[in-house]
DNA sequence: TTACCCACCGAAAACGATTGCACAATCGAT
DNA sequence: ATCGATTGTGCAATCGTTTTCGGTGGGTAA
């Protein structure tokens, strides 16, 4: 069916455009009778407003942008679903962009977002992000920005991420409680704030136990030969009984290594990870992990964004999501084993 | 920096808006001198065109929609990346929607797309899709539609998918070549055309070998207890030497089962799958698979969509992507084993 | 001088909606 | 009969562009 404009609709109704417009938006000035007539005709003639034209007057485009460093298989799909849900609930639609971890592209995309006048921006910053530069200049296009997941801790832009430091400390404590005294923590790229935070928390966690729990941290950069670095560190630390894995990506690499080299989980070595809750259930044995909820992060960030879009005096918020420990089958309880 | 409008820019330049507009778009009517002046001023005053306003004139929105049944961890991220790349190359932006496998929602989303006047739609249909209904009415909003991946074979709307029938036949042949004579094919939900096609191909492939290769097909529906159905069928067919897995989702479930029950790959049982090329490298041993490229599908579909958007007399295309066999470590060569 | 062409530029009408303001009609009150 | 208030509508401006259609002014040819 062909689209009809407000003007055409007004013509067939033999009324003025303004009356029709007001009738459709339930303006109190319009009588019930004409409202009814107009509404009936609008469905009859299949009228739908042209959102671009409306925008030009009202200054709202109904568009929210999500900018991601990359689309990976973990975390992102669920994050997108959560965001997409709240955006659609609000009758907005979601644009997505990928920055390929480049600061340049991040700037370009935000510039473009300003041009097409999106109403709000959700940004997960990439490894290329330049912390020294002033991010503030970006938001001045008008649309508020909320940082999520991979954030840059600051005091001017709202951000929501998971509590990364405490989680690593909790991990150390949990492993210690289960009797593990020699732990290796495996981390991803140090370019990410998220890695730094988790790494720091791991070391701090070890300090809490003074000498009772010993640990090493292994950083795996993108171009490292995982096979090599892992077998090296395990050889150097044969007393290791547990691994702490900071993400699903890291976990995947480590599982491959362990499987290939005949390590049994948890008989030979225990594993504790941070995960978005998909992977741990897919491999055998199911992996004990801290549940890092993409859904929660997505919903919170999107909700905050809409708050900021509505208020004219937005307050900057710093939200840290707590992770929940999900105990499955990959951590051996050495204390009970010793007893039994 | 504040945004400036064309009118304001024209004022500071002491020229008319039309001249400025033309100068910026390199219209031949404008002299090089004024073009230069205008362009310099435009960067000086940080002018960027308001695309919403432009679209109101030009009847285009610069928006392309991608409608997916769900955001899963396999396939979708890479598919999105590919599509996003070509869309951005064309200076369009990508809207994404999820239909949650509901036909209702698919209709709603397309209706909404018409309202915001997207210029083109990429649709991967969900299990809820009603094949009996007429999809044609949808496209009449004006924007062309291209179906991708999960398509509905028809003659009115372009679609790009992978060659699903031939691939199953090739799988049977390959396994037979490797000496396997008892195969179980594992499939997902029969609601999907893609499943039906692969399933049919599998049965046809078996027929080709008459009685020399025997096979069973196992359909796993969403609410099935995988553990149960798998152990049952393996018990009933103890002579089975190879499994054919139609997707990463199915593969993940089967791996879990095999690992848990102590089957070694490929010593105890061989595995061949269809995959987007991520998972097979993440688990040990690496899985021999037919590479079902999300990138290829995404690029082709998006490219076709843009062709249709540009041409006023679009031809409907039916593209089937060939899959490439990637031989890794999960299929045992029984013939060589017998010789050796 | 007249006529005509060409290279440049401007005025103004779209595009499709929202909205402040004026105005017409009705009615009760004076 | 006149005035004010009330109710329901329409006119016209506006948002920021693009684009059609003319209009200058100078140069060249007749």
Image (cartoon, coloured by chain):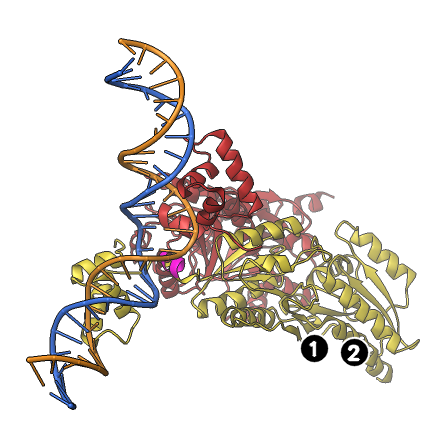
Chain colours: A yellow, B red, C blue, D orange
Spatial separation of the CA atoms under disc 2 and disc 1: 9 Å
Tag 1's secondary structure? strand
Foreground of the two, A64 or B6: B6
Q: Residue beneath label 2, please?
A: A174
In the image, which disc is placed on residue A151? none
Res. A325 mark: 1
Label located before the other in sequence (2 or 1): 2
Q: Quadrant location of the C terminus of chain B? A: top right
Q: Which residues are magenta?
A: A53-57
In the displayed structure image, the side of residue A107 where residue A48 appears, left or right: left
Task: Give the residue at x 48% y 47%.
Answer: B92
Q: Chain of mark 1?
A: A
Residue A253 located left or right of residue B172:
right
Q: Are marks 2 and 1 in contact (CB under 8 Å)?
A: yes
Residue B132 x %, y %: 30, 58
Chain bearing mark 2: A
Q: Residues within 10 Å of mark 2 (few under 14, many from 20)?
A: some
Q: Quadrant of residue A160?
A: bottom right
Image position of B196 (left or right of C27): right
Q: Is residue B213 above or below residue A57?
A: above
Is residue B237 at least partly visible in the picture? no
Q: Which quarter of the figure has residue B226?
A: bottom right
Residue B89: horizontal and vertical position, in percent? 52, 43
Q: Does dot 2 land on a helix, a strand or a loop?
A: helix
The spot of residue B241 in percent (x, y) is: 62, 55
Q: Looking at the image, which residue sits at the far right? A: A211
Work out whether residue B112 or residue B32 is closer to the camera in this orientation and state it: B32
Task: Tell me which residue sits at (54%, 42%) in the image.
Answer: B41
Seen from the viewer's position, the closer of residues A37 and A252 is: A37
């Amino acid at each position: 069916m062909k689209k009809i404009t407000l003007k055409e609709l007004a013509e067939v109704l033999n009324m003025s455009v303004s009356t029709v417009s007001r009738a459709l938006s339930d303006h109190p000035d319009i009588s019930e009778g004409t409202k009814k007539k107009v509404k009936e005709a609008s469905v009859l003639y299949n009228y739908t407003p042209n959102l671009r034209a409306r925008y030009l007057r009202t200054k709202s485009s109904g568009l929210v942008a999500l900018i991601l460093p990359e689309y990976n298989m973990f975390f992102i799909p669920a994050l997108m679903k959560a965001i997409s849900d709240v955006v659609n609930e609000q009758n907005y639609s979601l644009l997505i962009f990928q920055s390929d971890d480049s600061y340049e592209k991040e700037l370009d995309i935000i510039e473009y977002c300003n041009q097409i006048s999106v109403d709000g921006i959700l940004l997960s910053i990439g490894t290329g992000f330049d912390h020294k530069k002033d991010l503030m200049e970006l938001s001045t296009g008008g649309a508020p920005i909320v940082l999520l997941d991979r954030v840059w801790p600051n005091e001017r832009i709202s951000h929501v991420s998971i509590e990364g430091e405490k989680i690593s400390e909790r991990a150390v404590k949990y492993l210690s409680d289960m009797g593990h005294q020699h732990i290796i923590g495996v981390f991803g790229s140090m370019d990410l704030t998220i890695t730094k935070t988790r790494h720091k928390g791991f070391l701090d966690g070890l300090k809490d136990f003074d000498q009772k729990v010993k640990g090493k941290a292994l950083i795996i950069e993108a171009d490292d030969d995982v096979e090599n670095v892992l077998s090296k560190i395990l050889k150097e630390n044969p007393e290791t009984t547990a691994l702490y894995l900071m993400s699903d990506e890291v976990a995947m690499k480590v599982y491959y290594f362990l499987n290939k080299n005949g390590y049994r989980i948890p008989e030979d070595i225990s594993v504790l990870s941070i995960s978005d809750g998909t992977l741990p259930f897919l491999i055998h044995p199911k992996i004990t992990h801290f549940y890092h909820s993409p859904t929660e992060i997505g919903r919170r960030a999107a909700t905050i964004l809409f708050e900021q879009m509505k208020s004219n005096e937005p307050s900057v918020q710093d939200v840290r999501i707590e992770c929940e420990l999900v105990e499955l089958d990959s951590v051996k309880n050495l204390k009970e084993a010793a007893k039994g």
